[in-house]
Image (cartoon, rainbow, N blue to C red):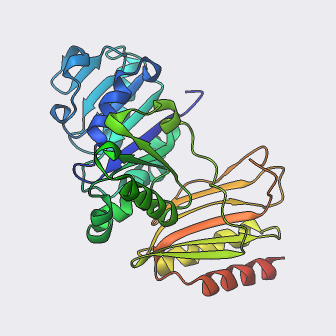
Amino acid sequence: MAERLPVSILTGFLGSGKTTLLSRMLASPRLGETAVIVNEIGEVGIDHHLLRRVDERTVLLASGCVCCTLRGDLSEELLDLLSRRTRGEIPRFRRVMVETTGLADPAPILSTLVSEPVVQHHFERGPVITTVDALNGTRQLDRQPESLKQAAAADRLVITKGDLADREVVRALKERLGTLNPAASVMEASFGDVDPFQLIRRAEHVRPVQSAGSLVISAHDVHALTLTFDEELDWTAFGIWLTMLLQARGEDLLRVKGLLNVGGPGPLVLDGVQHVVHPPTHLDEWPDGDRRSRIVFIGRGIERDAVEASLLAFNHVAG
């Protein structure tokens, strides 16, 4: 294949509205040529969009999408979809969406996309889309570790049921999500009403951060730490340093994402969830006039001074 197919992940805690969002997305003709992998087809309210059933686990939707049940290993399901497409058993598709269960940690799914060579040859990581219930999201972030992991892993945070909640509650939740995961965009969607392409477009850039050299924001025992560096970073030294950090603090580090100035015309894009770090990509140009390296860490007990000092020490030694 000339081009790898992007795999987007739709996650969110129990009852957060991801099924409603997925149903609306699949009903959009703009999202045709999409293969969707869900845990149980019966959980997705798509009956009124149903075109025909291909077999016991696959249905075709009027929009042109293919919807399959995940029965076992995700890598096997992805490769089976590809094989069935090649044989002409299902329509061609240009992208894949995976809906997780409400208690899922997205990290193992992301690991599948980068750790298995055959899967990596045909597929690439798309954005992680996390739904957060406006009515219950704050309580879930406080009490449910799965909810925190889902929010930390997100590239897009979608607040649902905002029409049922007080506007001050929605505002506070949006602010909290923005500080918990500064690398993600935060948007609202009532009844799944959101532009699907806005959700699935490639997530490359880190959102603008405060101009201060570093910032720590607390969300109970989980912190978002943002570091910026004016000087050029040595990529080899940074890679060694990040590997050591993950080995030492991998269980505590939920997310790392950044744009790194390593001397090229554009930045190097860094993206990792827990122990999983995706292969870095180089952009042809910077998204704005700010050419500083910007790195966001989300985790427990990550101390700003220690992280900043150790990274600078590695970079100076390499330089």
- Residue 122 in sight: no
Q: Quadrant of the N terminus?
A: top right
* Vertical arrangement, residue 14 with respect to residue 93, above or below: below
Q: Quadrant of the C terminus?
A: bottom right
* Vertical arrangement, residue 80 with respect to residue 146, above or below: above
Between 259 and 30, the residue placed more toward the observer is 30
- Residue 157 in sight: yes
**Where residue 219 sits in the image (x, y, percent)?**
43, 73
Q: In which image quadrant can residue 52 be found?
A: top left
Residue pictured at 31% horizontal, 15% vertical: 89
Numbered marks: total: 0
Residue pictured at 52% horizontal, 80% vertical: 302
Between 244 and 233, the residue placed more toward the observer is 233
State left or right for residue 255 relative to residue 140: right
State left or right for residue 107 relative to residue 6: left
* Vertical arrangement, residue 98 with respect to residue 68, above or below: below
State left or right for residue 19 relative to residue 31: left
Residue pictured at 67% horizontal, 81% vertical: 308
Residue pictured at 77% horizontal, 49% vertical: 288
Q: In which image quadrant can residue 226 be found?
A: bottom right
**Where residue 177 sits in the image (x, y, percent)?**
45, 60
**Where residue 173 sits in the image (x, y, percent)?**
40, 59
Q: In which image quadrant can residue 27 be found?
A: top left
**Where residue 230 sits in the image (x, y, percent)?**
81, 70
Between 97 and 176, the residue placed more toward the observer is 176
* Vertical arrangement, residue 108 with respect to residue 254, above or below: above
